[in-house]
């Protein structure tokens, strides 16, 4: 595989190969010099342009339900919180899908808390509607579901499934994600099952989880490549204040020099390194990034390796009830308002909206790695 052309500063003039080593990834995660980081930003953007082009693919998000049986220690819709919850009707979901078609999106994402009230049969009906009545790709993000459900939904036509593993440090994962009853979560194996079923598999991590070290984050980035993921979502850690982690003064703390900060710079470093490690994957510039940097967080993500935007199609009257974390960017904007804004912002970067489903187009290298 050819080198990317990125060089280590400060006298370390050897080329950094595309198959970045753990030591090099770790070196860049710890780097804070703005001049040196500019090299990383430029190379990530060049690699993005070479491998996935200038299109920014638009994937309309439909937040179907705020019910959740999980009790994750940072999430605002954790099952034990006493909050108002909602579940969209089937007709409301279909209207959101039609809106996505009218706005020219290539994909809709059916997202929810891990809600048993969203039955296998209901999700199958939604998938069949999307695939028979629209040109859209169908993406699911419904938590850890059974093999039988996943197989039926894939057979019905679902194209992609998204589930973040959040951190590859299993001890840290267990501290922030309690198991559900006797079930033991294994999200990495879940992603492998998705691949075997023929889904495009998407995952990702949170940056700055209390207790997350730079070494852990470097391992996360390299695991993206090992899993041969098709989409990677990276966002800063944001805990809802009315959760165990949100209320804790210094939860799961590391020495300050070892704790990964939940900042826009660290998040975009992770995006940039992900682009170099996995050059042909789809990478969104996330709402969480836009929330921690309200001025230009979304643009920074797109300038530093990302190529996907996920505008929200959920009716605005429900969005405050899907409060995973507070003050979410663009929460009060209608889908039409968001569309006008995002088109202006994409154009300001010299980029263009994507057309069609926007699935991963594998390079020869990624096909070889998958074998």
Image (cartoon, rainbow, N blue to C red):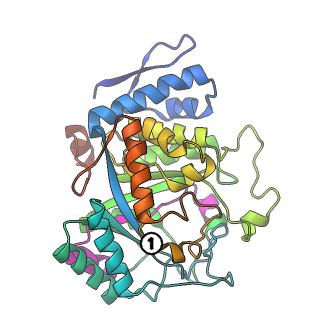
- The x, y position of residue 150, in whole percent, is 32, 76
Q: Residue 336: horizontal and vertical position, in percent?
A: 40, 62
CA neighbours of label 1 inside 10 A, class few (<14), some (14 to 19), many (20+): many
Q: Is residue 57 above or below residue 15?
A: below
The residue beneath circle 1 is 314
284 part of magenta stretch: no
Identify the residue at the far right of this view: 249
Image coords of residue 137 (percent x, y):
25, 65
Q: Residue at x 62, y 76 (%)?
A: 78
Q: Quadrant of the N terminus?
A: top left
Foreground residue among 341 and 273: 341
Residue extending farthest to the top is: 11
Write the residue at 67% across / 65% down: 175
What residue span does the magenta drawing correspond to? 148-173
Q: Residue at x 32, y 70 (%)?
A: 99
Task: Tell me where residue 320 sits by quadrant.
Answer: bottom right
């Amino acid at each position: 595989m050819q080198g990317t052309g990125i060089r280590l500063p400060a006298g370390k003039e050897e080329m950094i190969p595309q198959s970045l080593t753990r030591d090099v990834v770790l070196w860049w995660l710890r780097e804070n010099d703005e001049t040196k980081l500019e090299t990383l930003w430029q190379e990530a953007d060049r690699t993005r342009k070479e491998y996935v082009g200038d299109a920014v693919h638009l994937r309309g998000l439909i937040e179907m339900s705020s019910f959740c049986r999980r009790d994750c220690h940072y999430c605002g819709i954790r099952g034990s919180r006493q909050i108002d919850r909602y579940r969209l009707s089937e007709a409301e979901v279909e209207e959101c899908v039609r809106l996505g078609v009218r706005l020219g999106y290539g994909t809709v994402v059916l997202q929810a808390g891990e809600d048993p009230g969203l039955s296998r049969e209901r999700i199958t009906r939604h998938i069949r509607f999307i695939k028979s009545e629209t040109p859209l790709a169908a993406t699911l993000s419904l938590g850890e579901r059974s093999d039988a459900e996943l197989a039926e939904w894939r057979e019905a036509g679902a194209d992609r499934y998204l589930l973040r593993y959040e951190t590859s440090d299993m001890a840290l994962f267990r501290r922030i994600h309690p198991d559900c009853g006797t079930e033991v979560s294994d999200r990495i194996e879940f992603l492998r099952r998705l691949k075997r079923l023929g889904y495009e598999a998407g995952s990702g991590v949170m940056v700055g989880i209390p207790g997350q070290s730079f070494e852990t984050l470097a391992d996360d980035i390299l695991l993206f490549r090992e899993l041969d993921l098709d989409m990677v979502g990276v966002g800063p850690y944001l805990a809802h204040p009315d959760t165990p982690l949100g209320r804790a003064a210094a939860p799961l703390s590391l020495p300050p020099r070892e704790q990964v900060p939940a900042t826009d710079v660290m998040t975009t470093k992770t995006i940039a390194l992900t682009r170099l490690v996995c050059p042909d994957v789809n990478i969104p510039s996330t709402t969480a990034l836009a929330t921690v940097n309200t001025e230009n967080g979304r643009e920074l993500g797109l300038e530093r390796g990302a190529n996907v935007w996920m505008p929200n199609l959920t009716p605005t009257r429900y969005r405050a009830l899907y409060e995973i974390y507070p003050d979410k960017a663009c929460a009060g904007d209608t889908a039409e308002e968001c569309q006008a804004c995002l088109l202006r912002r994409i154009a300001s970067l010299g980029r263009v909206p994507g057309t069609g489903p926007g699935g991963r187009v594998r390079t020869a290298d990624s096909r070889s790695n998958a074998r």
